[in-house]
Amino acid sequence: MSEHQQQVKVSKVGRKFAIGYQMGGEMTSDDWIEVISRYRESILEVYFAMPGDMSGRAPAGLKLEGKKTDELLEAFWNDLERLKAMDVSGVMLFNSACYGVENQSQKLLDHVGESIEAVRRHIDLKAVTTLHPAIAQYVKSHYPELKVRSSITMQIGTIPQMEAVSDQFDGFYLHRDFNRDLEHIKAVRAWCDAHGKTLHLLANSGCLYQCPFHILHMSQTSHIKEISETDSIYENNRPSPCCDVYTYTEKQPMLLQNTWIRPEDLHKVSGYFETVKLASRISPTILDIVKGYCEGEWHGNLLKLFEMDYSVLPFVPKIMNDKFPDGWFEQTMHCGHHCESCGYCRKVFGQVAEKTDFMEKKEG
C-alpha cells in the first residue's frame, strides 16, 4: 500500500467512477476497499454479482479455495456494509450471457428477487445491470425504484438499438466499439437526454476492437466455474483465443486500435456519461486501475490498466503511457476507425512499445 499512501489528487472527471467488486484476498492481498475509501470523492458506485453467480466475469470467491459459501457471503456482506458507510452505492449484475437450463425459468427470477432483497439490507442499491429481457422486466415490475441498465455485453451502441429496448432499460452502457467516435457519442447522448435515459461508459476494456471472439468468450465466461474444473485446450488455461492474437508481432499494433481511453484523456469525454465504469473485477492490478483513472494520469505500462491485462502474455511489449504523442486523443476520436488504410496507430506503436525483460531473454 506504500505507493498509495501519497496525497490523493483530485479527479477532473468528478464523482463518476464505478469500480468492480473483488472478494478480499482473491486477486490481491491489499485491502481494495481501503483504496476505494482513499478515492471516495471520485467513486460513485461499486458493481457486483452475488458470490457464486454466473455473470460476465468469474464468480467472486472462485479462487478462494477451501472457503465455504457461508464464509464467502459473510465476507461479502461485511464489504457491502463498509461501502455503505462510505456513501458508495451498489449496482447488481445479472449479466451472464448464458444461464443454461434455467434461462427461461421462474427459478431464475426467484433468485433475482431473493438476491436483491438480501443485498438491500447491506448497501444502498441503486440499479441492476442485465442483458436478459425477462430479468429487466421483472426488476422494473417488482422494484420500480431501481434503475435497470443494459449490460455492455448486449453491444448496444446505436439509437435504433436503444429505441428497440427503451421500454426495458433506463440506461445503456455504450458499446465499447463507439468509445472513439466523439460525434457519435454526442448524438447518442442527445437521444438519451430526450428520452429520459442515462448513458454509461466502460473506459478501460482490453478487448479487441470488433472482437470476433466476443460471443464465444462471454458464453465461456458464464460457465467459467465448470470450465475451470476441466482440462483446457488453451495454454495456461486461457479462456479465449483473443489472447493468441498478440503473440504475432505484426498484429501487436492492434493494441492501440482498441476501445480504451487513457486516464489523461478521460475528462474530455466523461461529461457525456452518467458513470464511468472501470473493468476491474478480476484484475490483480485493481489498485493501479483505481489510482490511474481517479488521478487522471499514469506513468508506466498502460496495459496494466486494462481488463484483459495483456501485459502478462509472453512476447507482448510494454505500452509506455508517457510516450504517447500530443494529439493522440484528437486523432483517434475523429479517425473513423479506418485502420486498414490509416497507419497512425502503427506509427505511434513504434514510439510507445518497449520490450519487456522476458522478451529480451527469449530473443537473446
Image: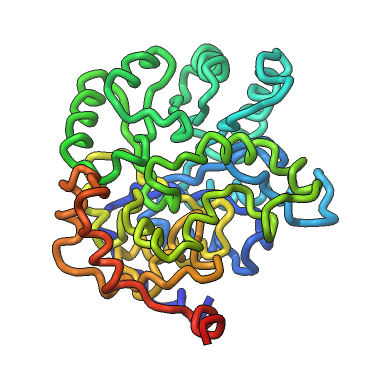
Q: Nearer the viewer, residue 25 or 126?
A: 25
Q: How many marks?
A: 0
* Residue in the image at 47% along x and 47% along y: 88
Residue 17 is situated, as x and y percent measured from the top left of the image, at 38, 49
**77 vs 331: above or below:** above
Q: Is residue 85 left or right of residue 40?
A: right
Residue at image position (36%, 46%) is: 276
99 versus 343 height, above or below: above
The residue shown at (20%, 34%) is 184
Q: What percent of the width, then of the height, locates residue 204?
A: 40, 53
- Residue located at (36% from left, 41% from top): 176
Please identify the quarter of the rendering in which residue 305 is found: bottom left
Residue 161: name its quadrant: top left
**Residue 24 image point, x, y percent:** 66, 59
Q: Residue furthest bottom?
A: 364
The one of 68 and 298 positioned closer to us in this rendering: 298
200 or 250: nearer the viewer: 250
93 to the left or right of 255: right
How is this picture coloured? rainbow
Q: Is residue 253 left or right of residue 88?
A: left
Quadrant location of residue 120?
top right
Q: Position of residue 71 (x, y in %)?
A: 80, 49
Whether 94 is drawn above or below 73: the answer is above
